[in-house]
């Protein structure tokens, strides 16, 4: 199978520096193997989508020489695929309706230090009296799920103990990220997922879903995050971005920053030439 990577931004604002680093990293992994690089817009959470953001992100990728293969797909146009996946899970009794509200979960769920709350299984054996179906949850298997991250080495997680049964369709009817990304990666024949380290804890859940649906598991690489001065993750909502900004007049400087952040030191004149040289370079500092 042709090596295939992808960049999957949410069109909730313009491309920011952290997302650019993730895009450059995933582009380099795919192109170094002579593979394909796809772009997918993760726009399922429609209330957060900002009109025009998808086009703005694509134009920014073009400015940095990050060319993609094939058509750009939008998750909002792929609902039928998620419906089919959910039906498959229901047929296997691997999902169930949950009637818990956020207030219910706040009262009953426990949270390990630094992690999200663990669902206590309130609705696993049927809806308690007086509750109506809201979200749909996946029956998490009681096993340790491990994978070899191309950057971080061996990673193992007992999802049942650390997360519990997680949501695959929200109470508002929107499909959750975990299910949508698994279905999309399989449908697009993605063989390598290169993304930010903030999504490392999602990987075991996604592998559990892949196994439940009989889908292949791609390789994973989780890149270090670009953070603010206080150590928080850099995001679209940050008003004061660290230098260099993604100003159209500073493309070369910003791309050099992204490459050096990934451990690649280049000094060429044009963005596309920087990437071509970087594609054959090795990541420094053990980041690759």
Image: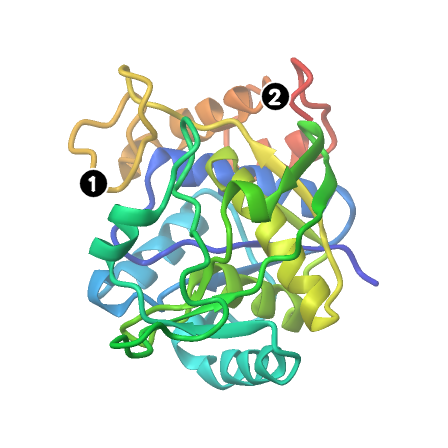
Q: Position of residue 145 (x, y in %)?
A: 70, 45
The dot on residue 264 is: 2
Which numbered disc flags the more N-terminal residue, 1 or 2? 1
Q: Is residue 195 visible?
A: no
* Residue 256 as seen in the image, left or right of residue 15: right
Label 2: state its secondary structure: loop
Q: Is residue 141 above or below residue 90?
A: above
Of the numbered discs in the image, which one, if any, rests on residue 237? 1
Give the label on residue 109, or none.
none
At 72% across and 26% down in the image, what residue appears? 281
Colouring method of the image: rainbow
Image quarter where the N terminus lies is bottom right
137 shown above or below 205: below
Q: Which residue is drawn at 26% across and 47% down?
A: 106
Closer-to-camera residue (45/243): 45
Q: Horizontally, is 46 left or right of 136 in the view? A: left
């Amino acid at each position: 199978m042709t090596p295939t990577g992808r960049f999957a931004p949410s069109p909730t604002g313009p491309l920011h520096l952290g997302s650019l680093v993730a895009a450059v990293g995933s582009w380099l992994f795919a192109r170094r193997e002579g593979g394909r690089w796809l772009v997918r817009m993760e726009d399922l959470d429609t209330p957060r989508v900002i009109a025009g953001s998808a086009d703005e992100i694509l134009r920014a990728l073009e400015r940095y020489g990050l060319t993609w293969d094939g058509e750009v797909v939008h998750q909002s146009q792929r609902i039928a695929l998620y419906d089919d996946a959910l039906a498959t899970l229901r047929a296997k009794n691997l999902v169930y309706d949950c009637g818990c509200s956020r207030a219910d979960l706040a009262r009953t769920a426990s949270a390990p230090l630094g992690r999200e709350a663990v669902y206590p299984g309130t609705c696993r054996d049927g809806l308690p009296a007086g509750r109506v179906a809201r979200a749909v949850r996946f029956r998490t298997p009681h096993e340790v799920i491990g994978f070899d991250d191309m950057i971080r080495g061996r990673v193992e997680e007992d999802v049942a103990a650390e997360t519990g049964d997680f949501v695959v369709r929200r109470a508002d009817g929107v499909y959750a990220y975990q299910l949508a990304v698994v279905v999309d990666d399989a449908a697009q024949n993605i063989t390598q997922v290169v993304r930010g380290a903030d999504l490392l804890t999602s990987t075991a859940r996604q592998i559990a879903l892949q196994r439940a649906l009989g889908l292949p598991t791609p390789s994973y690489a989780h890149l270090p995050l670009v953070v603010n001065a206080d150590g928080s993750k850099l995001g679209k909502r940050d008003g004061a971005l660290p230098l260099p900004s993604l100003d159209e007049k500073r493309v070369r400087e910003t791309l050099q920053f992204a490459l050096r952040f990934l451990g690649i030191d280049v000094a060429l004149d044009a963005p596309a030439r920087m990437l071509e040289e970087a594609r054959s370079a090795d990541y420094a500092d053990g980041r690759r």
